[in-house]
Amino acid sequence: MLALVLDRSHACLLEDGRVPEVAVDGPRPLLAVEARFAGLGVDLPSTAGSRGRGDGAGRDFVFVGDRFAAPAGMAWRPLREAGDDAWGLYVACMLGGWEPPVRAIDVWSFGDEPEMASRLAHLVACGEKRVTVGWIAASARSGTPLAYPGGVSVVTDGYGYPRLVLRTAEVRELPFAAIDAATAAGEGEGDLTYEDWRAAHEAYFDAEARRHGLAFDESALISVERFEVLHVVGRADIPPRAVPGESGWASR
């Protein structure tokens, strides 16, 4: 069995450059995976998905959570460097079988806390949000990559679970004061007025300034990204499932 362990940015925990393998041991394959990592001093989070092997070797599992110190012989590596086994398992279990057009993907979430990340991802999935902005100086201070035209990214909720796959269509760099009402409305947030957008973003960037030891004002350079949605994770044709009926099991 394979055990693909991901942090919230979807870096992979690899053993000698490969996805860690676990020997099948008894009728509960997950217990074998948990026991092997417990022996390394790692308490794995709950599973994020699994895939049957079809070769008598049990199931492959995926886990996602906060990064921990890599055990001896293991190391964290970007997903794009993790090989075919990791990529195939990631696509099957994290993206529901939908494969991005490239492996060179970035993984990130909106905002600065789980509720905001989930809410803004929801606005994208519903078609309301097609623009996002970021303060370039704060991104540099935190080590967050900037968007670039044509770049493909997986957007997660605040806990590292994928919600969207986006492709950047356009990037502009503007002073905060030069962002207009049409651009603000493209963010799809609040009541869609320019005044509401300014108030919310001034508060957000002021908080970033305090967090990173910066000073925010009207001249702050902002990255304005317009994107298209390639995939909404989990949005697919769902086959009928059995539910209890008056006589036996019915389908819906």
Image (tube, helix red, strand yellow):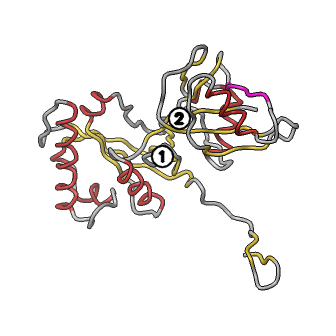
Give the amino acid type for the residue marked by disc 1 in the picture. Thr
Q: Give the vertical position of 215 relative to 202 (above or below).
A: above
Check disc 2 and report the residue beneath it: 10
Callout 1 touching callout 2 (CB < 8 Å): yes
Range covered by the magenta-colored residues: 19-23
Residue 186 highlighted magenta (yes or no): no
Q: Position of residue 77 (x, y in %)?
A: 55, 23
Q: Which mark is residue 138?
A: none
Q: Position of residue 209 (x, y in %)?
A: 18, 36
| Alpha carbon separation for disc pair 1 and 2 | 10 Å
Residue extending furthest right? 56
**Residue drawn at 44 percent across, 59 percent down:** 122
Relative horizontal placement of residue 151, taking residue 187 as reference (left or right): right
**Residue drawn at 68 percent across, 48 percent down:** 97
Assign the C terminus to one quadrant of the image. bottom right
Check disc 1 and report the residue beneath it: 156
